[in-house]
């Protein structure tokens, strides 16, 4: 069928009109989108993202010369533990539910400061036992299990359940007797492990990491803060070289069928915690010894900035004790008191921010023998 010239002209005109109509629509759509984007930019201006350094922070700390002026930083820049960091571990032995959060707080600090050492929590296997049918699990157990899962997920902590020692006939065993410190020698596939006595606060993990690199003449080394008149109390830090032989030697030296912590600690070689005298860096401090600092040239800010680990001994920081008793335990010096209060406040805040736990309630009881008030944990 042939089209006439008139029909061809109409077809061409219709095509031209359709093309220009589409172009007009397209230009209007583009103009509309530009207007919308301009309004969005005016209402919500685009902010350039911050520049993120491309250097690996772990490599910068452990495989190059790290920033800072501490002897510990410089030493770690060129020294490694025997067998590497995979054979070195921080190990916490938690025996009471109230100790779980403190252990996790320490591992959270290690994660934040990118410590390369492994992390292990030993805890009673009975916490994993399912309750009998129809019974609910103890709420303290539920809380501890939740926190242990958090430690494994967020802070790369390996969880190691341990069994209690066999109980002889007689009075029931305490948590310390059922799960003694001799368990610390059981992970003999590690070359070096480090245990921090609860409760405490890690302020700087780098000096603690240094301990994994130092030579040891004894398989068990305990470090304590200098006490009053040079007295040395129980170790707040225990460094161990675990092995089957070391475990066997210790077990054979203890009373038959018992593994008391006091007997175990007597076999630990005791040393005073070293100090970097050039920069006045402390590896370890005790809150109970801060009163001795009151007479010296003590500065609270410097203390908090240059101390690696503070062992909090009296009163226990997990409990909400009465204000007058809290004040009674404070150091007498102004600067020492400021540092003391800051340590307790930091522990309390970390307990809430990391574990979601407030301080534990306490009750007052009267010691009938001497009429002395004591603080007892609510059971």
Image (cartoon, grey):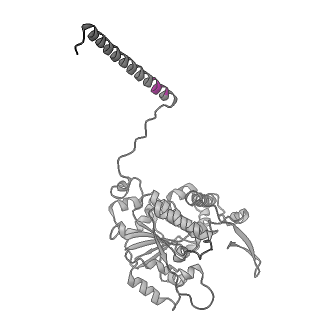
Residue at 62%, 85% in the rendered image: 172
User: Which part of the image, by quadrant, shows the C terminus?
Assistant: bottom right
| Residue furthest to the top | 6
Q: Is residue 14 above or below residue 60?
A: above
Q: Determine if the magenta segment contains residue 95.
A: no
**Residue 199 visible, this angle:** no
**Nearest the eye: 44 or 213:** 44
Magenta range: 35-39
Q: Residue at x 63, y 88 (%)?
A: 171
User: Is 361 placed left or right of 174 in the picture?
Assistant: right
Of 182 and 40, nearer the camera is: 40
Residue 102 image offset from top left, x and y in percent: 55, 66
x and y percentages locating residue 135 in the rendered image: 62, 74
Residue at 42% from the left image edge and 58% from the top image edge = 114
Residue 196 x, y percent position in the rendering:
50, 70
Per the picture, the main secondary structure of the magenta-coloured stretch is: helix
Lateral position of residue 343 relative to residue 11, left or right = right
Looking at the rendering, which quadrant does residue 296 occupy?
bottom right
* Quadrant location, the N terminus: top left
Q: Is 155 situated left or right of 379 in this image?
A: left
Quadrant for residue 191, please give it: bottom left
Residue for point 41% across, 55% down = 69
Task: Please tell me how many numbered marks the rendered image carries.
Answer: 0
Q: Nearer the viewer, residue 257 or 208?
A: 257
Picture coordinates of residue 283, whole percent (x, y): 48, 65
Instruction: Kindly indicate the quadrant of the structure image that contains residue 290.
Output: bottom right
Does 174 sit above or below residue 21? Answer: below
Regarding residue 246, the answer to whether it shows in the image is: yes
Up the image or down, 307 lies above or below 266; here it is above
Going by the picture, which residue comes out furthest to the front?
1
């Amino acid at each position: 069928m042939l089209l006439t010239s008139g029909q061809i002209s109409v077809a061409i005109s219709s095509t031209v009109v359709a093309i220009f109509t589409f172009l007009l629509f397209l230009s209007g759509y583009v103009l509309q989108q530009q207007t919308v984007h301009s309004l969005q930019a005016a209402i919500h201006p685009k902010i350039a993202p911050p520049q993120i350094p491309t250097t690996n922070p772990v490599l910068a700390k452990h495989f190059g010369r790290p920033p800072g002026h501490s002897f510990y930083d410089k030493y770690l820049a060129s020294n490694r533990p025997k067998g590497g960091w995979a054979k070195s571990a921080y190990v916490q032995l938690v025996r009471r539910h109230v100790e779980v959060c403190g252990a996790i707080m320490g591992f959270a600090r290690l994660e934040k400061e990118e410590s390369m050492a492994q992390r292990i929590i030993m805890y009673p296997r009975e916490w994993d036992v399912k309750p009998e049918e129809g019974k609910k699990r103890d709420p303290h157990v539920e809380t501890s299990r939740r926190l242990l899962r958090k430690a494994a997920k967020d802070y790369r902590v390996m969880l190691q359940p341990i069994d209690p020692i066999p109980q002889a006939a007689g009075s029931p065993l305490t948590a310390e007797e059922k799960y003694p410190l001799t368990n610390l020698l059981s992970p003999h596939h590690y070359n070096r492990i480090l245990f921090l006595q609860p409760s405490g606060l890690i302020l700087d993990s780098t000096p603690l990491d240094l301990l994994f690199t130092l030579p040891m003449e004894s398989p068990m080394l305990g470090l304590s803060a200098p006490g009053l008149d040079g007295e040395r109390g129980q170790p707040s830090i225990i460094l161990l070289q675990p092995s089957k032989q070391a475990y066997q030697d210790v077990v054979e030296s203890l009373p038959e069928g018992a593994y008391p912590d006091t007997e175990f600690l007597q076999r630990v070689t005791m040393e005073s915690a070293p100090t970097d005298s050039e920069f006045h860096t402390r590896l370890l401090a005790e809150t109970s010894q801060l009163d001795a600092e009151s007479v010296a040239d003590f500065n609270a800010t410097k203390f908090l900035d240059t101390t690696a680990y503070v062992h909090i001994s009296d009163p226990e920081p997990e409990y909400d004790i009465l204000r007058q008793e809290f004040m009674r335990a404070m150091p007498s010096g102004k600067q020492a008191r400021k540092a003391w209060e800051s340590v307790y406040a930091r522990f309390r805040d970390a307990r809430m921010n990391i574990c979601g736990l407030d301080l534990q309630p306490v009750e007052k009881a009267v010691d009938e023998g001497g009429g002395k008030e004591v603080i007892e944990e609510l059971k």
